[in-house]
């Protein structure tokens, strides 16, 4: 038996009486709470359909958590079981009116894009926070959506009547000029046409306002190109008011921070961005000079080792420097001849190490790193030129750097500059004994 749908007669109806025909357990996930499917002879609950979400409310005292359309029946998904017989239902009218505003606003905005630019709506979604339509246009300029928004709001301000009527195909073909229809109906009978007086006529089964003035403000918030169409995001009525409130508050607070009027905010932010970029360039130059100064001081203080003249710069900091800082410092040190930089920094939880050498030093940094990282229970890698890694034993960092220094110093003392791996075997085995 088809369910009688009261929302077609009165989309503003809150309370209604009905007969519960049956109540069955709903198919659900084994870990979710029990749900029930309730079918009544009559309902004012709108189901998920046509891009519009379903209503919420109560039915025979049970919370209605979802409403679906199954053939000619409307199925209410409830949180508790409901007995057969007479019952009453109550719609969450705040949610219903929000959906009425958004859906009617969508018809108006879609009609505006169609009448001004010939752009058809091929997608519609009514979400919890905003509404979207997908238009048959690869791109929409700011001037275009502003013009459509302006026309849509004019239709709202004119408070045009909105009516919904049912037709069959033959009657509609004989009585309605096809050019008035923004979208052709897919059905051949029980065609419901929503008419915004003198502006838009389109097939739709959703709930709508009685007059366009009830939609309130229509505000486009953003556009986005998606797979050959343009998605337009917008809000209507109470949502538009809420959107304006937080944006207005944000503008006033930001303007107060900069001691300017809200209208001057974009220009002031632009100036700040320019100043930040200039300051960043100055900081980058200052850091470059600081690295060069530190590198020179560390290189000059390191004594040349043996006949090779290699200067081993070793440093284990507890200041929590990041890996980028260590790499920059090591690079500046190793721009000088016969240099090896063995740098490490630790924080409370981890340690970082960077090993680098000058081009005229033959010691393999990646092999050296592999010998040393176990001391800090770390991992890493690199090349003969530069290697880096980290470990989870920061308290062992000074020992790891000392071990690396000993390995390199032993290699540097050899007139033939034996590889770090050979030197490491002797030093690590002695150290661990």
Image (cartoon, rainbow, N blue to C red):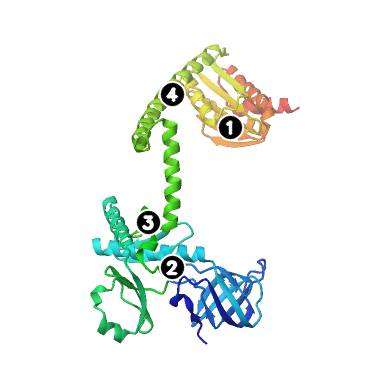
Of badges 3 and 2, the one in the foreground is 3
Q: Position of residue 37 (x, y in %)?
A: 60, 77
Quick one: 389 or 3, which is closer to the camera?
A: 3
Q: Position of residue 313 (x, y in %)?
A: 56, 19
Label 2 with label 1: CB-CB less than 8 Å = no
Can residue 308 be seen at all in this image of the molecule?
A: no
* Residue that badge 3 annotates: 217
- Crowdedness near tag 1: few (<14), some (14–19) or many (≥20) residues, C-alpha within 10 Å: some
Q: Marks 2 and 1, how far apart in space?
A: 62 Å
Label 4 with label 1: CB-CB less than 8 Å = no
Q: Earlier in the sequence, mark 3 or mark 2?
A: 2
Of badges 2 and 1, the one in the foreground is 2
Q: Earlier in the sequence, mark 4 or mark 2?
A: 2
Q: From the viewer's perspective, is residue 269 above or below residue 138?
A: above
Q: Marks 3 and 1, how far apart in space?
A: 69 Å
Q: Marks 3 and 2, how far apart in space?
A: 21 Å
* Residue that badge 1 annotates: 367
Q: Marks 4 and 1, how far apart in space?
A: 35 Å
Q: From the viewer's perspective, is residue 266 above or below residue 30?
A: above
- Left or right: where 232 falls relative to 94: left
Q: Position of residue 279 (x, y in %)?
A: 40, 25
């Amino acid at each position: 038996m088809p369910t009688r749908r009261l929302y077609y007669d009165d989309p503003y109806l809150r309370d209604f009486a009905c007969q519960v025909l049956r109540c069955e357990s709903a198919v659900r996930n084994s870990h979710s709470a029990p749900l029930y499917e309730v079918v009544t002879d009559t309902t004012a609950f709108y189901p998920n359909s046509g891009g519009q979400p379903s209503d919420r409310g109560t039915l025979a005292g049970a919370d209605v958590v979802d409403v679906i359309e199954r053939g000619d029946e409307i199925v209410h998904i409830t949180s508790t079981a409901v007995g057969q017989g007479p019952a009453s239902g109550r719609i969450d009218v705040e949610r219903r009116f929000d959906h009425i505003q958004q859906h009617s606003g969508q018809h108006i905005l879609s009609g505006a894009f169609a009448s001004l630019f010939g752009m058809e709506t091929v997608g519609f979604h009514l979400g919890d926070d905003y509404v979207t339509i997908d238009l048959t246009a690869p791109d929409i300029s700011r001037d275009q959506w502003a013009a459509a928004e302006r026309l849509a709001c004019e239709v709202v301000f004119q408070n045009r009547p909105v009516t919904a009527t049912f037709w069959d195909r033959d009657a509609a073909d004989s009585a309605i000029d096809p050019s008035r229809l923004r979208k052709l109906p897919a059905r051949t009978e029980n065609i419901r046409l929503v008419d915004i007086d003198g502006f838009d006529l389109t097939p739709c089964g959703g709930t709508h306002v009685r007059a366009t003035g009830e939609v309130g403000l229509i505000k486009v918030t953003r556009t986005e190109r998606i797979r050959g169409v343009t998605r337009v995001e917008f809000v209507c009525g109470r949502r538009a008011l809420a959107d304006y409130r937080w944006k207005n508050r944000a503008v006033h607070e930001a303007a107060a921070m900069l001691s300017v009027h809200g209208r001057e905010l974009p220009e002031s932010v632009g100036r700040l961005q320019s100043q930040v970029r200039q300051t960043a360039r100055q900081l980058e130059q200052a850091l470059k000079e600081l690295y060069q100064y530190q590198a020179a001081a560390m290189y000059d203080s390191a004594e040349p080792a043996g006949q090779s003249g290699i200067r081993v710069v070793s440093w284990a900091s507890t200041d929590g420097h990041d890996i980028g800082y260590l790499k920059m410092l090591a690079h500046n040190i190793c721009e000088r001849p016969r240099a090896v930089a063995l740098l490490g920094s630790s924080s409370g939880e981890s340690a970082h190490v960077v090993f680098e050498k000058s081009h005229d030093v033959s010691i393999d940094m990646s092999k050296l790193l592999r010998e040393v990282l176990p001391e800090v229970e770390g991992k890493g890698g690199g090349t003969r030129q530069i290697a880096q890694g980290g470990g989870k034993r920061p308290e062992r960092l000074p020992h790891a750097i000392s071990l690396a220094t000993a390995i390199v110093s032993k290699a540097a003392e050899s007139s033939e500059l034996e590889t770090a791996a050979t030197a490491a075997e002797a030093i690590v085995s002695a150290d661990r004994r």
